Amino acid sequence: MTKSELRKKYKGLRRKLSSEEVDDKSIAIANNLLKLDIWNYNFYHIFLPIEEQREVNTEFILNILSGKDKDIVISKSDFETLSMKHFLLTDSTRIKKNDYNIPEPIGGIEIPSEKLDVVFVPLLAYDTLGNRVGYGKGFYDRFLSECRESVIKIGLSFFGPEDFITNVNPDDVKLNYCVTPVKLISF
């Protein structure tokens, strides 16, 4: 399937999930993440979910990271340049939804992409090769290409993989793992 076909399919599948299902599946994803050998690093980048899009609720992963006393980094999107800036999440960080309902920090301590060790990546769909489909603006592909080559890229999905995405671009950055409520997939 093409990226646009997959976007339509998985947006539809997500719309069918109740708030309770989103939370239950998100907790299962967080529990499965604990099985990965990724907890000895310092800087973890995580997305704050767009609730209206029924994205994985990352609150449970945030609790794990806080409990392990990790440096947590979140992003602010610039829709003019289609780029993101990254900020340390602290007790004093103020969060506000932008025009697209994306929760974002209002200022703070900026962290360069090269400093990140692990990135939890939002997605709509992915395939058995580790290619992902997002919302189509390329924010995460540009961001991930700025990170060190050794950064660990972990997709979070309520669903299993597609066999393959037919229109993958050379600029698309592949995942190292995808974590679902039922399994860990390594690429």
Image (cartoon, helix red, strand yellow):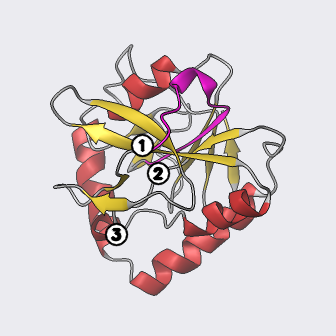
The residue identified by callout 3 is 51
Residue at position x 56%, y 68% from top?
59
The residue identified by callout 1 is 75
Q: Which residues are magenta?
A: 108-122
What's the distance in space between the residues labelled 2 and 1, CA to CA?
A: 7 Å
Secondary structure under badge 2? loop
The C terminus sits in image quarter:
top right
Front: mark 3 or 1 = 1
Quarter of image, res 170: top left
Compare residues 123 and 159 and report the one nearer the observer: 123
Which of the marked residues, 2 or 1, is nearer the chain's N terminus? 2
What's the distance in space between the residues labelled 3 and 1, CA to CA?
A: 16 Å
Residue 141 as seen in the image, left or right of residue 81: right
The residue identified by callout 2 is 47
Q: Amino acid at mark 1?
A: Ser
Q: Amino acid at mark 3?
A: Glu
What x and y, as percent, mark residue 117?
68, 32
Residue at position x 65%, y 26% from top?
151
